[in-house]
Amino acid sequence: MAPSVHVFAPATVANVVCGFDVLGFAVDAPGDEVIMRLKNRSGITISKITGDNGKLPMNPLKNTVSVSVQHYLNSIGRPDIGLDIELHKKMPIGSGLGSSSASTVAGLYAIKTLMGDDSSPEKLLPFAMKGEELACGHGHADNVAPALMGGFVLIRSYRPLDVIRLPHPKELFCAIVFPDVDVPTREARQIIRNKVLLEDAVTQWGNIAGLVSGLYTNDIDLIGRSMEDVLIEPVRAMLIPDFYKLRKLAMDAGAVSFGISGSGPSVFAFARNEQTAHLITQKVQEHLTAIKINSQAYVSKINDNGPKILG
Ligand code: HSE
């Protein structure tokens, strides 16, 4: 039998409200899976994609998984390696949960494993960012970095790339609700203003510094009051039905903080325990159902492990 590997990579919450393009963390579930097999014949094929309702390209020149894997193979001087990819989507596409990142990271971790490459997963980051560029026109790292490295991650700089793992309170739970409305990242990026007022920038960097301090000192109150976004959320909130009503419901149910996950439409909250996290998803989902919007909910701790080999 040809060598093969089956890898899971986690969904991620990018931005974490105040840290547009610079903060993200991984969750335990959902996530995507890739099964990769080496072949005798050179070139990459994609033999199967499940869970995407036919939305994703089977053409290896257009699929983010194969494209990023090919970049990796080129970089190690093995561009002609033959392999086949099966992609199993276990999370909604265009959800703001780093769907394309989870697939790309699962693929890159699979090829690294098949190649016997024991360098740190962080080294795969530039290839994963190529996948993001293909998926939404911009190579940001706030989904791919936590999906690859696990945990809570800060992209301190893009040029040069400088990525820092942050600690976090172990008891924090994350409640996520995906309202089933379409918000492609490419479009959610186009509506953002590209100039900001100094006054707003001061508020924002104060909040980012406060959030990072709270993560280091396990100060959940500080984390909560720092998770305020005066730059991006006021614009993107309009893409999410009843966003401010959902926030009030979550906060009244005991959330530490509430905001948009990545570019949306998923929303997320931090909670001090699992029970509160479930109560938050229940309240948010009840309201979405009342306004006739289907939704899916996930409750998870912050995932410190990143990708996992399933077989
Ligand atoms: N930081 C990115 C954005 C994440 O908000 O556009 C995309 O999921």
Image (cartoon, rainbow, N blue to C red):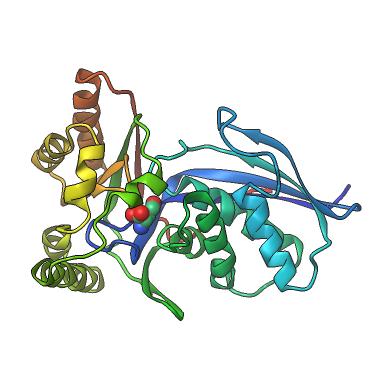
> Residue 186, relative to residue 248: is it above or below?
below
Rendered location of residue 89, percent (x, y): 56, 38
Q: In the figure, residue 167 lies in which quadrant?
A: bottom left
> Residue 196, relative to residue 132: is it above or below?
below
Rendered location of residue 146, percent (x, y): 44, 61
> Residue 297, relative to residue 267: is it above or below?
above
Residue at screen point 31% across, 58% down = 15
> Residue 64, relative to residue 152: is it above or below?
above
Residue sitting farthest toward the right: 40
Q: Look at the image and tell me whether residue 38 can be seen.
A: yes
Q: In the figure, residue 154 lies in which quadrant?
A: bottom left
Q: Looking at the image, how many numbered discs can be counted on the residues?
A: 0
- Quadrant observed for ligand 1 in the rendered image: bottom left
14 to the left or right of 71: left
Residue sitting farthest toward the bottom: 160
Rendered location of residue 109, percent (x, y): 63, 59
Which of these two is toward me, 189 or 38? 189
Residue at screen point 34% across, 63% down = 21
Q: Look at the image and tell me whether residue 302 can be seen.
A: no
90 to the left or right of 311: left
194 to the left or right of 310: left
75 to the left or right of 38: left
Rendered location of residue 25, percent (x, y): 37, 58
Which of these two is toward me, 182 or 110? 182
